[in-house]
Amino acid sequence: MGIKIDALKCTACMACEMACGYHRDDGFAFLSSCIVPYRAREKTDYFGVLLKEEENLIVARPEGLEVNKIGEAQEEDSEKEADASAKPMLLREGCDLCEEMEDHGPMCIEFCPMNAITLEEE
Ligand code: SF4
Ligand code: SF4
């Protein structure tokens, strides 16, 4: 089971980032969130989402999903837009699907107003 992100629906509202930070720290601590939206500087209305899992860094872009094994792929694609934001992500805890939230499902899914995040059964 894991999180699936449809970047075409994302508006970079940051609700998922705030919700995940709250799950981590009981406060709106952006630096502890393992899900982060980003905007491309040179393109308008282009949004993507980064997700840190235990072993992978997921980069969801409008044109598709990219799964990078942590420790292998990050250095190779230095030209890619997400890389500058991706590096700090590697220091964060991986997504635990909000396993300790008793009365709520994954927080990012609950708070995404665009239904861009769903739970994927494997
Ligand atoms: S499921 Fe929970 S831990 Fe994982 S990205 Fe969403 S809010 Fe963060
Ligand atoms: S909450 Fe949904 S729409 Fe907002 S930034 Fe996250 S994925 Fe995008």
Image: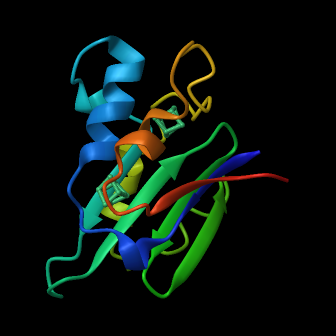
Residue 72 is left or right of residue 105, and the answer is right
Q: Position of residue 74 (x, y in %)?
A: 54, 61
Residue at position x 49%, y 69% in the image: 60
Judge whether residue 47 can be spotted in this image: yes
Judge whether residue 70 can be spotted in this image: no
Query: Residue farthest to the right?
Result: 122
Q: Position of residue 20 (x, y in %)?
A: 39, 32
Residue at position x 33%, y 33% in the image: 19
**Colouring method of the image:** rainbow
Q: Position of residue 120 (x, y in %)?
A: 71, 55
Q: Is residue 94 above or below residue 119?
A: above
Query: Residue farthest to the front?
Result: 103
Q: Position of residue 91 (x, y in %)?
A: 45, 33
Count of labels in the image: 0
Residue at position x 20%, y 56% in the image: 13
Q: Is residue 20 above or below residue 56?
A: above
Which quadrant of the view contains residue 50? bottom left
Q: Quadrant of the N terminus?
A: top right
Which quadrant of the view contains residue 41? bottom left
Q: Is residue 64 above or below residue 16?
A: below
Depth check, front residue: 92 or 12: 12
Residue at position x 61%, y 42% in the image: 53
Depth check, front residue: 43 or 69: 43
Depth check, front residue: 14 or 113: 113
